[in-house]
Image (tube, rainbow, N blue to C red):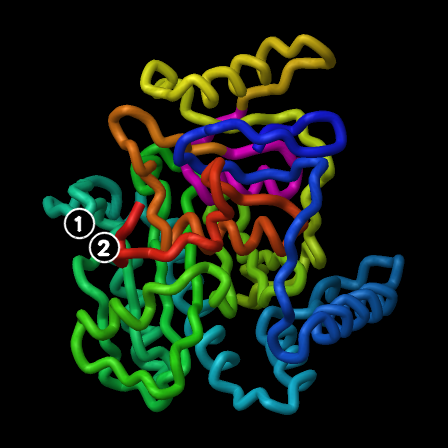
Amino acid sequence: GFRSGRGWSWESCGRFLWFGFFFGGCCCFGGVFGGGVGSERGFEFAMALETKHSFMPTGLEGIDSLTLSRFVLQMQQMSAEATGDLTILMNALQISCKVVETCVRRAGIAKLYGLAGSGNVQGEDQKKLDIIANDAFKENLEDCGRVSVMVSEEDDEAIVCSKATTHKYAIAFDPLDGSSNIDANVSIGTIFAIYRLDSDSVSKTPAEGAKAIMQTGRNIVVAGYAMYGSATNLVLSFGEGVHGFTLDPSIGEFVLTHPGIQIPKSGKIYSVNEGNAANWDKATTKYVENSKYPEVGKAKSLRYIGSMVADVHRTLLYGGIFMYPADAKSPTGKLRLLYEAAPMAYLMEAAGGKATTGEIDILDIVPDSIHQR
């Protein structure tokens, strides 16, 4: 959809991906762990901790910050139905992010730059850090015993977890998004989505696991991303609000630094790879041209990093639009649905934005394969 005054006007735009806020309304999800109450309590707790700090430096600033572990535990306590399984899963997830963060920081020194000499199911060359990140997530998530099925960008088939003690959850993840930027030391990241499974479904084969996790984004329980840049951020949503945490290396914990992220109602930035412009359809070309040469108002600024996590993170904080349009070379687009497009769409809608193919909401797409684009 195109922004038009304070409403929406629709044109046939082909299949491509937009993230950002428009003046139209926005969809939000129902809560998990007792809905918005947990989020509000988290904000109140964070504010209470903030007021405890002295205005005089003591050397202990931040020691009583609201960590991700405490935040998740608080939300668990808000729900009488919570069993702690998701809390354990989230702990394994954040440990995996810390392992990858450490490897990224030491990549140059530890000679982890460069290609590994292999390719993934997408036909893309794998970097050394791609493989390390993938192994870290698979091992930690498997060992936590709370994941029944895993799907990774780096693996051809769905992975059935033999150590699962419960079969409520499946997770899809891109262990290292933007890996083409690794050697240039540009921000890269991890994207993930946790899906709830049918309580009667116990997958025994990769095919059964794939069938179980191929759900629309509306069934996501938690989605988020970690970004490894000048700081390491972990941004996630349980369906009610989006919360940003930053890794404090002095204590080795993610602490709440961006509670209740809301996308600005208007933005001055558009983000797209204009190197593909020759292959775009007319509607996409027209929109981008209008962003650069508007008949009314100021032109938008182009910002494109080439790492989806970094581009979406900027869009969340500054507003605007991120697009990866389908084109003549990639008629169904290039972003993978289960572990890239759907989790980012989940975050965008929870933050008050919109995510669409130009025809339907991304969260309403029913996948037909685990690596569908």
Q: Quadrant of the C terminus?
A: top left
Work out whether residue 246 or residue 285 is closer to the camera in this orientation and state it: 285
Q: Which residue is pictured at 28% across the width and 56% down the height?
A: 368
Q: Which residue is pictured at 42% across the width and 48% down the height?
A: 341
Q: Position of residue 30 (x, y in %)?
A: 63, 68
Apparent side of residue 261 relative to residue 328 in the rendered image (left or right) = right
Say which element carries label 1: loop
Say which element carries label 2: loop
Q: Position of residue 64 (x, y in %)?
A: 72, 71
* Mark 1, residue position: 120
Q: Position of residue 183 (x, y in %)?
A: 31, 36
Look at label 2 and name its amino acid. Glu
Work out whether residue 306 or residue 24 is closer to the camera in this orientation and state it: 24
Does residue 160 belong to the magenta stretch? no
Instruction: Give the magenta range.
Output: 303-322
Q: Which residue is pictured at 46% across the width and 27% down the height?
A: 272
For residue 160, which quarter of the picture? bottom left
Q: Which mark is residue 154?
A: 2
Chain-order first, disc 1 or disc 2: 1
Q: Position of residue 232 (x, y in %)?
A: 52, 52
Q: Is 159 above or below relative to 318?
A: below
